[in-house]
Amino acid sequence: MKFQLKHIFLLAGALLAFTPVIGVDYFLDKYIKNEAVSRYQESVNTITSRNQSAVSSAIIAMKKVISQSPSLCTPTFVSNVQKQLLANQQLAQIIVENKDRVQYCNGYNSVTEYILTSAELPILDGAETIAIAQVFGTDIPMLRISSQIGQNKIISAFIHLNADLSGILPSSIINNAYLRIGLTNGTKIITSGDVINDVEGEVIHSKVVLSSISNSIPIVTRMTISFDSVRAVFADLYLILTIAALIFAVSFLVFVFYAIRKSNIPSIDLERAIIKGEFHPYYQPVVNLKTGQLLGCEVLVRWVKKDGTVLSPGFFIDLAESSGLAVPMTIKLMEQVREDLSELSKQQPELKIGINLFEGHFRNSIIVDDVKAIFSDSNVLFSQLVFEITERRPLTNQIAVDAVVGGLQALGCKLALDDAGTGYSNLAYMERLGVDIIKIDRVFVNMIGSGTTSVPILDGLISMAFDLDAEIIAEGIETEDQAVYLRARGVVQAQGFLFAPALKKDTYIELAQQMNKPAKTESLQEETSDKIKKKAA
Ligand code: MN
C-alpha cells in the first residue's frame, strides 16, 4: 500500500488543474487567428473595393469623354480627357488607338508606349476588358481598361491600383503584412510589403492569410500577415489568461489537496498503521441472559489514529481483506489480546474470547500454527478461544477450511459461525463446517419489536442451532424486549448495546471483575453495569 489511492487522486487533480495553463496557448492561438481573420478581412475588402471603384470611375470617365465630345480626338475630346485625369486620382491616362496599337490621341498629346503583360479578361456585366499594362518609363504596372468603338478603334483608360494599407490596418500589422493584387487567372499585378512565404491556404500556423475577390472585376486581393505580429497585438490577453489559468490551477490544486485530506482517502495506509501499532483490540462483553453473568467477549478491532480518531472496522475491513493485510492484523491483535487479558484469564479462566477470522485465514492452515505460537505458554487458555468464521467472502478451499477448523478444535478452541443466516452461509454448510457456536446476526434480532410474538426466520435459526447441538450467541441486542424474547426461546448468550458496546481493555477487565464476583448481589451488578455503560458512552 505504498502507492495509495490518494496519490492517484492528487495526480489526477494536478493534471486537471494545469490543463488550462497548457491549454491557454493552444486555445488562444485558435481564438486569435479567428479574431484576426474577422478583424482584418475588412482591410482587404477595402483595398478591393477601392480598386473596383477606380475601375468603375475609369469606365464612367471614358463614357463621359465620348458623350461630351463631338468626335474622337478633337481638341474638345482631349480637353475632356484632361478634365477626367485631374478629377480621378487613380486614373493615369486615356488613349485612343486602333487594333494594331497605332495611337490617335491621349490626354497629354504625346505617345504612351506600353506592352500588355497579361491576357485580356472581360469585366462582368460590361463590354470592357482589363489587362495588365507595363508603361514605358514607369516601374509599377497599371491596369488597362479597354472598350471598342466602332470597327477598328479602341479607347483605353490606364489606372494605378491602390495597395495602400495605411489607415486601414494597425502599423504593427502593416509592417508584417504582404499584400498581393492579381488577376483571377493568377497573374500578379502589384504587391506591397515583404513576401511572407506566400503560400495559398487559409489560416496556417505561422501566418494568417486573408483574401477578397471583387464581385465585378477579375481581381483578387490577398493579404498574408505573420502570426507573430498578430499575437503581439493580443499580448495582454495572453498574459491575463495565463495568469488567470495559473490562479485557477493553484486554487484547484489547493482545493483537491484539502478535499483529499478531509475525506477518508488519505488514512487508508493500513500497512503503516499495523507497523505503528495503531490497531487495538476492544472487547464487547457477551453476557448470560439468565444469570446476568459475564461469559466473555468478542475482540473487535479499532483503528486508533495519531490524532485520537477511532475508526470502526467498517471503514477499513474490506480493504484489509482484499489487500491480504487482515492476516497480519489478526496476529498483532492476538498478541495484544494475550497481553491485555493475561491477568484476567488467570482469575477467570472460564471467560471466552471471540476472535474474528477472515477468508484469507482459510486458504491454508498457517493460522493454526500462529494461534499455537501466540497462546501456548500464556495465561490465555486455548479453551477460552472462540474463532469466528465470517462469511462475507465465500470459503472455496474446502481442504484448507477443514484443516483450519480441525486444527483449532484439536487445540481445544471453539469455532463459531459469525453473522449466521447472512452472507454465503446456508443450512447444509453450517452443518458440514462442524462449528460449535452459531452467532445469530443482528438483522434477525432487530426483527423483534415490542410485543412481537414470533419471528419465523429467527425462530427457525434458533431451532436449527439446537438441532445441530450448537451453542447460540445472539448479536446486536438493543432492547429489553429482544432480551426477553430470546431468553424465552432458550437463547442464553447475548451481546449488544443493551449490555455494553466494545470496551477498552481496562473497562472490560473492571467490568469482568465487578460482574463475576461471587459475593455480588443482583442489584449491585446492575449498578456496576450502568456505571460501565456511562463510561463507555
Ligand atoms: Mn464477529
Image: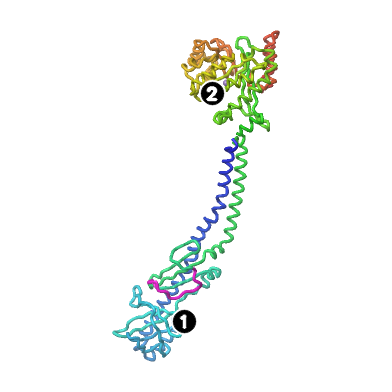
**Quadrant of residue 199 in the image?**
bottom left
Query: Tag 2: residue type?
Result: Asn
Query: Tag 1: residue type?
Result: Asp
Q: Residue at x 45, y 81 (%)?
A: 88
- The answer to whether residue 499 is left or right of residue 65 is right
Q: Earlier in the sequence, mark 2 or mark 1?
A: 1
Q: CA distance from mark 2 to mark 1?
A: 100 Å
- Quadrant where the C terminus lies? top right
- Quadrant where the N terminus lies? top right
Residue 190 highlighted magenta (yes or no): yes
Q: Position of residue 319 (x, y in %)?
A: 56, 31
Dot 1: what SS? loop
Magenta-tinted stretch? 183-196
Q: Is mark 1 within 8 Å of ligand 1?
A: no
Dot 2: what SS? loop
**Quadrant of residue 229 in the image?**
bottom right
- The residue identified by callout 1 is 139
- The answer to whether residue 166 is left or right of residue 78 is right
Residue 387 vs residue 11, the one in the foreground? 387
Q: Residue at x 52, y 10 (%)?
A: 469
Q: Is residue 221 above or below residue 247?
A: below
Q: Position of residue 43 (x, y in %)?
A: 48, 69
**Quadrant of residue 146 in the image?**
bottom left
Residue 373 vs residue 252, the one in the foreground? 373
Q: Is residue 396 above or below residue 258?
A: above
Q: Disc 2 or disc 1, which is closer to the eye?
A: 2
- The residue identified by callout 2 is 364
Q: Is residue 534 visible?
A: no
Residue 157 vs residue 28, the one in the foreground? 28
Q: Quadrant of ligand 1?
A: top right
Q: Residue at x 67, y 17 (%)?
A: 378
